[in-house]
Amino acid sequence: MLLYKRLICLLLAGVLALWTGTGSVMAQQGAIKIMYTDPLSGPFAQVGDQNLQQFKYIIDYINGRGGAVGRKFELVSFDNKSQPSEALLALKSATDQNMPVIMHCSGSNIAAALIEGVDKHNERNPNNRIVYINCGAVATELTNEKCSYWHFRMDAHVGMKAETMVRALPKDLTKVYLLNQDYLFGQSVQHDVKAFLAKLRPDVKVVGDELIPLGKVKDFSPYVTKIKASGAQALLTGNWGPDMTLLIKSGMESGLDIRYYTMYAHLGGGATAIGPAGNGKVRSVMAFHENIAVETGKTDTEGWTKQFRSTHDFDFYAAGFRTIFEFLQAAMNKAGSTDPAKFAAALEGLTITDMLGHQVTMRKADHQILSEYFVGVFTKGVKYDSEKTGLGWKTETTVLPKDVDQPNTCNMKRPS
Amino acid sequence: MEVVLVSLLNGLVYGMLLFMLASGLTLIFSMMGVLNFAHASMYMLGAYFAYSVSRLIGFWPALVIAPILCGALGALIEMYALRRVHRNGHIAELLFTVGLAFIIEKGVQMAWGLLPVPYRVPPVLDRALFHIYGSNFHAYRGFMLLISVLMFVAIWLLLTRTRIGLVIQAALTHPEMVGALGHNVPRVFTIVFAGGSVLAGLAGVIGGNYLVTEPSMAATMGPIVFVVVVFGGLGSLAGCFVASLIMGLVQTFAVVLEVSFADLLAHLGIQVTSSTPLAEVLTIPLPRVGALLPYLMLILVLLIKPRGLMGTRDT
């Protein structure tokens, strides 16, 4: 009887060992799963939705070029409803399934929660670590005070965008008006733009400096009246969504004939909302627009984004997303592994050539990407228009990685 | 002086847009006691219908067709859903409209997508009407003013000069009595709900291309309209009109008046420095909180005069 029980135990143990053994073998040969979390429902659903479609397009392309270490990438999406707590659920789900990467783009508050969550998890589970790829949360402190070894930011931060905006101001422009949303992001834009104006363009005078309640203003005509009265030659704003489009529309209608410098006019819905009236007036600080490839003669890149246009109902804007996967591909191949502990080390300080032919670097000190950045003007007569408006973006200023290589205060703790 | 005049015009236009939205809501709210959370959704549907219709046959037919579509939808909602829920009291009705608002928003997202749609001002109105101190007064804004004034006059005549108007007015203040006198109160309810939806739809046609037509437009316009209705007072179209103008003007002037509490105190001889208690709050300039003033006014009016400015019934 006892022998019988022992036999069963042995058998069970054997089956179990076999099962887990084959499991891990299969995991090695299967896809490299990447958790992607962003709002996929609610008022910001369009952001997550468009990101997701572009990611899928990019992953198909990268997988077509061999994926990484002989395996293919696979995206798993998780709706975080713009809530940090939901994003942490996505992290839990990712680590439960041993995914090597979690990716998240919008909301610096969510990014801060994820950085903390990833740090804790990696400390407690040295055998099941995860890397956090930040594809668009731009608060400067995420790679400064809050920097983490496991966090890699693949987009320019607020300070870099503000500097790009200031560098794009023409020499004869001397009076600017600042208008931003009254919350953390808007205030940092306000602060950083003023700081870079003082540093790079002391001749420029700030004739107006305004904060508006986030998403509350419906009628911007009183602001336009004020801007007009101030004699400003340009409006500098970090506003997004209706706060940006309504402001610009109101300005157009009142005949406020100045330059509009934005950070988000090129994103989904901006071109539609601004319309033909914005011709030659609206500018945006951006990582990419489809006409850059035309302007610089990168025909392969042009063909690639054209292919996206023909199969989707919006424009491709996420060149940075392709850079993310080219970085992951390069780092995993270099490390020869999809183990986060190994490829994270390979990713630090890595330099690759992006789809526009520029050298981009993942800065080792703070894990902030250094890439080229552009200021484009919304205008007629470009090859690829935006959202079927007949108008599209044309590059006015190109800022190279070295121009925005801003110092950082990151004191990074590396795993021993 | 020139800033005052321009701001006056700005405030007037914005106030009248608010009135177009709020007039329908105040009729429904006063009469049926329903805080119709789906009212702003009708506004949104009006804008989307107008966009789709104007792509097919132009803006002017859309100006008529879109509000009628909204009215028909409103009538159906009242007859086949709201009337059933009505038996279970006002809370049930309120929850019903909240649910409806979500469903309409999701429906709009599925039908027209998540992004703004290119619903534009008709070219004939897309120009400057006149210049005032170097600023354009856009022709479309003049058109908005015209439509809203016409609307106000029409509602006014309908309510005071027609039989159905008199019944509605009576039902605003004494619904039970009107029913006791043998009028078909449920049908009056349907008419009011459909009429309110027509007004919301018309506001959508007018507001959708002046602002931006996108799925969150209902959610962002909703709160301010409630404020107008409660502030103006239940059962009072005139109160709603006055409240809309006040809200429009207050928000407009709050933006251009660069003052704070600290400046006010300075006039009284009290200097605010960084060591003064609450210095952070006292030095916030008015424009930064301007858009929140309506909500402050709502709280004040509910504390001091719970019936609202010209209300004839308790909230």
Image (cartoon, coloured by chain):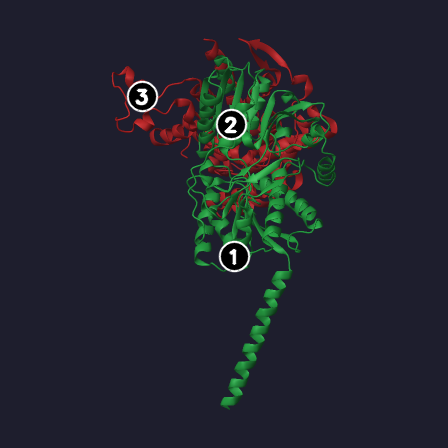
Chain colours: A green, B red
Mark 3: secondary structure: helix
Provide the residue designation for mark 1. Answer: A95
Give the foreground label among 3 and 2. Answer: 2
**Amino acid type shown at disc 3:** Ala
Q: Position of residue A188 (x, y in %)?
A: 45, 31
Residue occupying the point 55% across, 31% down: A402
Instruction: Provide the chain ID for the residue under circle 1.
Output: A
Can the viewer see residue A287?
A: yes
Can the viewer see residue B171?
A: no
Question: Mark 1 to mark 3: distance in Å?
Answer: 53 Å
Q: Position of residue B226 (x, y in %)?
A: 47, 32
Residue occupying the point 62% across, 31% down: B47
**Amino acid type shown at disc 2:** Glu
Q: Is residue A34 above or below residue B146?
A: below
Query: Could you say which disc has been placed on residue B262 in the image?
Result: 3
Q: Earlier in the sequence, mark 2 or mark 1?
A: 1
Does the CB distance between marks 1 and 3 fall below 8 Å? no
